[in-house]
Every structure is written in C-alpha cells, then in structure tokens.
Image (cartoon, helix red, strand yellow):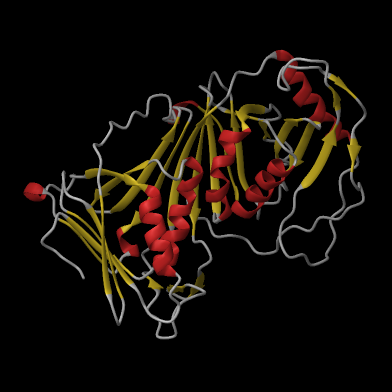
Amino acid sequence: MFDQGVLFSASTVNLEHITTALNCLTPFGTKDDVLIIIDRDGLSFARQNNKVISIQLYLSAELFVSYSYNPPDNDPDAHHKVCVKIHHILNSVSVASRDKDDVVECTFSYNGEGSPFVLIFEDSVITEKVEYSTYLVKEWDSTGLELEADAVIMECMLRGEVFYNALQDMKEIGCKECYLYAVAGSNGKNVLALISRSQLGLSKILLPSEKSILEKLEVFDPTTFQKTFDEPVIGAFDFSTLDKIRSSVHIASKVLLRKDVHGLMSVNILSQTDDFIFGDVKKSRHANKNGAVQFSKEYPGIVIDVAILEKARLDDADLIDVRLLMEAGEQRQNPSYGPLQTHGPSVERDVTYTTHQGGSLLFGGKDHSADTTHGDNEEYVPATNDIPLFF
C-alpha cells in the first residue's frame, strides 16, 4: 500500500532482515526513543547512551521495493527527523516476519511533524494498519563522540565472527574492565588482543593474525601520526558499555576499528546477516519459493557506526600489568598450525590470575602468579576462504 502523496513512504517484504537490523539497537534500551532520520538515500536509526556510546544504523533505500521521499521545495539535501519508541516498531515487524506461509508487505509512512509514524502490513488476505505516536525531536549532540580522522592512532579490520567470539568469551568470564591491545609488527606479525580484568584477575584473548581474519592493522605515532611499528596501542573500556555492540558484531561480515588520540574508538560494521549470495541476487534462507524475498544487487547490507569513549586513561600500573601479560605470552612457544579442517575461526585464550589486595579491580592489587595456559600444543587452523573487502 504505497502512497506517494505523503512526505515519506517505503514498502518492503524483507521483514526478517529489518528485524535482524533493529535488534542491534535493543542493547541501548528497548523502551527508549530512537531517532529516525529520513532522506533520499534511506533510513538511519540513531541512539545514544550517557554521552559515552552512540550507534547509528543505516538501511539503504535499495532494501525497499519502493521508496519515496518528497521534501518541501524538492531539496536534494533535505532530511526529516522523527522520534518513536523502538520496541513498538520492532515488535510489530517481528510478529509480521514470522508468517512463513504468505508474503507480507510492510509499508512505512510519515507525513511530517505532528503526524504519526504508520506501519501497514498487507498479505493476500488482510491488511493491518498501526499508528505510533511521534515525539519532539531532541537535538542530536555528538560532542565528544566524533572520531577525529586526522588523529587516528590505530586502525584495523577483522572478520566479524572472530570479534564476536572474543566478546562473547569476555562476557562469559565476567569481564568488568576491557583493554584493547594492538601492535603492528615490523616483521609483519601483527597482534590484536582483548584483555579482561575481572574476579579471575587478568586474562587475554589473542585474536588470530592471519590475513583472512585480521585483514589490516596499522598503528600511528600519537604525535606525528606517522606509521609506527612494535609500539602497542592500549585502550581501556567499561565492558558493560563495549558489550552493547555484541549484537551488531554478531551479524557482521567485517568490522573496522579506529581509535583516535582523544580516546574515542569508532566501530564500523557491515553486515549481510544470514543471507546467501547467488550471482547478482541475494536471497534469504527463509525466502519464499516464488522468490519474492530478494535483495537488489545494489543493496550494500546493514551498515552500523558505533562510537565509544574510553572509560579512563590508563595509569602506569595498569600499563605495566597489560604489557607484562602480553610479553609473557610472547615468550611462550608459538602454537603450531596444522592442515586439519575446522568449522570456523577460533581465538587463543590465556589467563593470568592475580592476587587482589583491596580497592577496585581496575586499580587494585598488582601481584601476579605464574601464567597458566591451556594447551601449548593446541592446533589452530586459519580460515581458508578470504572475505571480500567491503570497506
């Protein structure tokens, strides 16, 4: 039920894909407002938490069967903003996407300030219309959450599945404080690790450095911003904040991490979710037999941008802790790599237990016992299929 007479109207049958995308916003609050930005190129959904993390999720106009935006004076740079409750839209789309026996078409429409945000669901039998109240748009304050592109000190691109597994492991061990450790080796051996400080003490997850997984890692001098080697970049984050991106990373094909000298980390995510690619046309696993659920070959996938502020600057004692943990790992025998087939990438895990002597976990006791590792002879097999570069 496409209406070109309103300010904005767009129709799609890819409801499961939209449900997957909107679920990435739920860790930022399920009952809070989401800012929807409408322009000629598509829809953006934006959220922010406590001035320390923000997310912007973009759905291109190519996702929709039909897409119409008619701004006043036909201004090509025009855009409109509207606030709605994210769980209202998500619940409606999620319920409609469960119908596997019929093609359900959903039309989004909005006619400007003061009008409701409308969803119309239509299948071969019935048509349902839902109107949601819209709210006064708050000014989007991105102060402190914009990456300074000319002051980047670390940039890396890695496979989303591996990064998700690392975040999931950090969650399972009860991580409280998380450190990101990155080194570009002059010998070509790059190191990227996540380090946890929890009740277990310090532990690290060392991500595989194969090109098919860690595609790019560059470190820059914080003064000259020229490439540098063998010097680590360390960032400290509150894990409860960092963990909000886990849902987004779960569906990621590629993740681009960039950190600037001011302690802001930008996470750019490109995802094709669970879609298969057949030639020039993408089809969902749950596509109907008549092929109605298809993606345009111009559709880039779900694009997500996240900005995260560091929790605090590292003091010297924390830096020593992290460096000792990483250096201890480098002194051990390197794991062997065999030709066995595996079902996916893995991560190397090392745990160092510390004796806590009071105070917070982040700034508490610094005594360490000997490293305990699990299987120096374990075999890791790098992935055999390279992932295409999307960025």
* Pick the front one: 313 or 329: 313
* Pick the front one: 194 or 191: 194
Residue shown at the point (41%, 30%) measured from the top left: 146
Looking at the image, residue 347 lies above or below residue 313: below
Residue furthest out toward the bottom: 290
The image quadrant that residue 18 belongs to is bottom left
- Left or right relative to 2: residue 222: right
Quarter of the image where the N terminus is located: bottom left
The image quadrant that residue 10 belongs to is bottom left
Residue shown at the point (25%, 40%) measured from the top left: 135
Looking at the image, residue 364 lies above or below residue 93: above
Percent across and percent down for residue 263 are: 54, 24
* Pick the front one: 183 or 175: 175
Percent across and percent down for residue 233 are: 64, 28
- Left or right relative to 49: residue 103: left
Percent across and percent down for residue 84 are: 31, 46
- Left or right relative to 248: residue 127: left
